[in-house]
Amino acid sequence: MTGRGDGRLPLPLSSRADGDRWVSVRAQRTVLGVVHNVTSATRLLDLLAVFAGDPRVETVFTCTGSSAFDAGTAEFLTARGMVQVPWAQAKAGMFDVAIATSRGGDLHGLRTPLIGAPHGAGYGKRLAPEGGDGPAVSFGLSPEWLMHDGRVVPSAIVLSHEEQRERLAVSCPQAVPRAVVAGDPCCDQLQASAPFRADYRRALGVRPGQRLVVVSSTWGEGSVLSAGDPDRAVLRRALAELPLDEYRVLAAVHPNAWYGHGAWQMQSWLAPLVEHGLILPVPDSQTWKAALLAADRLLGDHGSLTLYGVRLGVPAVLGAFAEAKVAVSSPMARLGELLPRLLPHTGVQAQLEDAAVRQAGDAELQVVRESLTSHPGRSAALLRQLFYGWLELPEPERPAVPSLVPLPAGTVGRALPAEPPVFASTGLRDGRAHLRRFPAALQRGTAERHLAGAHLLADVDHPDTEWVGSADVLTVPAGRPLRTAGADAWGAVFRRYPGLALLAVEQDAGGALLVLRDGRTLRAVWAGERPWWATAAAAASVVHDHVMAVAGPAGADPVRIEVRTGEGCGTGLLDVAAG
């Protein structure tokens, strides 16, 4: 057979009748990677890592074409240079072993020994069989997904924990002899990467002293993305209610949701949140793993990321949880019983911090953590032993160890020239000004107690003129001229905006020239080592709230104000003098 497999995909060299003429590396065995969608493909790559560096083994890939979420799958494979075999040819061909991380498609048609593995944590989903016939069952552990015409389809069924073997014995006893408990490669990779937490935080743009909140959403009804009305949705509340200097928020969206609606559509829907600081990585990378390693808090649902986050010890609150979609007696079901649910009328910050206190040392949560893998740290070795046994090849001499999670790159974040409007307050406590800022545009429908005593600050050229016209403080970034020219440019700004109290013109090193409505001017300079958050806008907020204390006569000594924000974010010393 030569040419193309189905008129679209070129055949791999190993499948061509004249392949021997063209190969550069003559592999001894060929593995078929069976892909259902992007979700299963990402997990499959975790498993195939055990073949890295072994030229005796060549892997080709095929897509079953059976998933409702197969959009983006071909692009995923092509972008990574993964040689593809048409599904019809894959079923007809003889490979040495096939590995699948989903039960979808007519896998019974393969003529190759099949190893089936999960594409999430712990076989935790309850799902109706494809076609919609029959009751919902534990996905991956029941006859509907394991048997065809009275026979068990996979030659080996990879489990991560002994408790799954117990569930398998109840739901599909015929399959128990083929079960292999081999641990969880994702758990092991996360654990191996945990010592590099600081590196992942820096790569994600988390500043010193900030807390990273990961909001994870699986797909479908009952997920975080689908829960609640738009004004009270979990992601919106997290961005609106968490002080922006003290917290960063990252959305880990399930590939089925991302590709089911399309990347452009998902990014369009979440664009207003990205504008206000949301980190939005594409889900076909390993950035979600880096995010869990960097996370301080987790807002999750019934998706696997919640389990993996809890496994790492990240304090968690459930923003949504669809009990009907969770397998009975699974670790995920137990997690749904143990974790608190996000309440609509209590602040997000208070609930997250309460969870952190209550979950520290929780013995019942520790039982759930231990239920993800029966062989912590050994999954790579056990999977390699299984795979090479079916390939009838001796294992490589080098040890099989988990790979590190790559440092993330190319995350989608705010990239606009104008800072979004914020509500800010700088109340005095213990002789210090404590700065807190919140995205103004996201406050509709939130529990607004966190805004008590706040003023509105906006960029003077922000395109939303309602915010500019309502602002107490307007900022002018360094090097940008005011649109109003002339000797009385500042006065013109105050006449245009009758409610404006303070105009702040940014100067070097985060300092500012501050113009009051009565025409007086002040100069604010950050003294000593300046924390990352100590900007001209921060200085303007401090002066706005304490102008009576700092606006002395010309020539008076500068007034020094000690300014703080979140715990661990550093202290700024602001010198303010009449100018």
Image (cartoon, rainbow, N blue to C red):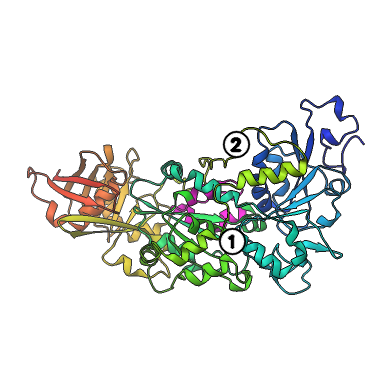
**For the residue marked with disc 1, what is the amino acid?**
Thr
For the record, the magenta segment spans 264-292
The residue sitting at 77% across, 62% down in the picture is: 146
Q: Is residue 290 magenta?
A: yes
Q: Position of residue 384 (x, y in %)?
A: 67, 43
Q: Left or right: 238 with respect to 453?
A: right
Question: In percent of the image, x 55 and y 57: which residue is there?
Answer: 305
Q: Is residue 340 above or below residue 248?
A: below
Residue 486 picture location, percent across and down: 28, 42
Q: Secondary structure at mark 1?
A: loop
User: Which mark, by number, is residue 218?
Assistant: 1
Q: Nearer the viewer, residue 2 or 405?
A: 405
Residue occupied by mark 2:
399
The quadrant of the image that shows the N terminus is: top right
Residue 287 in view (yes/no): no
> What predominant SS class does the magenta segment belong to?
helix
Q: Is residue 337 left or right of residue 173?
A: left
Give how far apart the Cα atoms at labels 2 and 1 are.
Answer: 34 Å
Q: Indicate which disc, 2 or 1, sits on the residue closer to the N terminus.
A: 1
Pick the quarter of the image with the C terminus. top left
